[in-house]
Amino acid sequence: MRILFIIPYVPTRIRVRPYNLLKTMVERGHQVTLATLWSSKTERKQLGSLENLGLKVLAVPLPRLRSLRNCLGVLPTSTPLQAIYCWQPNLKEALQTLLKTEHFDVIHVEHLRGSHYGLALTGRGIPIVWDSVDCISHLFEQAVVHSRTLFGKWITRLELNRTRYYEGWLVNQFQA
């Protein structure tokens, strides 16, 4: 299979789940293109080890200022901060360009933070699998109870209902 695997952070041996998924897919003979974002020099260096696994890598920088602007922009809306934190228009454009020249059997999108890329790529006749990884709203439910700081309590209360609604909506946006 030809798989486009979109992950909003660089998979490494520390981020073991996506790293091992990618490694195993390549070992089983799949052609995998990884589209990802990097936010530090260390992450950028780690991209080479992913290419050594046999992955084709499409990587774009995500400056912290971009993430901050993303979050501030949706603060007065119902969009959860987690859903927009890793949005980088340059990656969306690179993905759209890639899909004009290469054929993929499936697009795999990881995490709530990657979901906007999946939404941007719908309607192309390619099945999209959104891999939520975690139920972020459930994590926020726990954080509301266990957060020790006022800011932590405030942000989790702000995000809980927005995220709960968004996750429920998102499940129905991708037809595999």
Image (cartoon, rainbow, N blue to C red):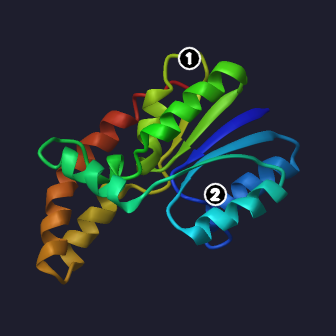
Cα–Cα gap, marks 2 and 1: 25 Å
Instruction: Give the position of the C terminus as an image quadrant.
Output: top right
Q: Which mark is residue 30?
A: none
Instruction: Give the position of the N terminus as an image quadrant.
Output: top right
Q: Please, what secondary structure does the residue beneath circle 2 have?
A: helix
Between 144 and 78, the residue placed more toward the observer is: 78
At x 19%, y 70%, the residue is 144
Q: Is residue 137 left or right of residue 24?
A: left
Q: Which mark is residue 124?
A: 1
Q: Is residue 157 left or right of residue 164?
A: left
Instruction: Give x and y (percent) for residue 46.
Output: 68, 66
Q: How many marks?
A: 2
Between 167 and 116, the residue placed more toward the observer is: 116
Instruction: Give x and y (percent) for residue 159.
Output: 21, 56
Dot 2 amino acid type: Pro
For disc 2, the marked residue is 18
Dot 1 amino acid type: Arg
Q: Residues within 10 Å of mark 2 (few under 14, many from 20)?
A: some
Q: Please, what secondary structure does the residue beneath circle 1 have?
A: loop
At x 59%, y 16%, the residue is 125
At x 63%, y 24%, the residue is 99
Instruction: Give x and y (percent) for residue 68.
Output: 28, 57
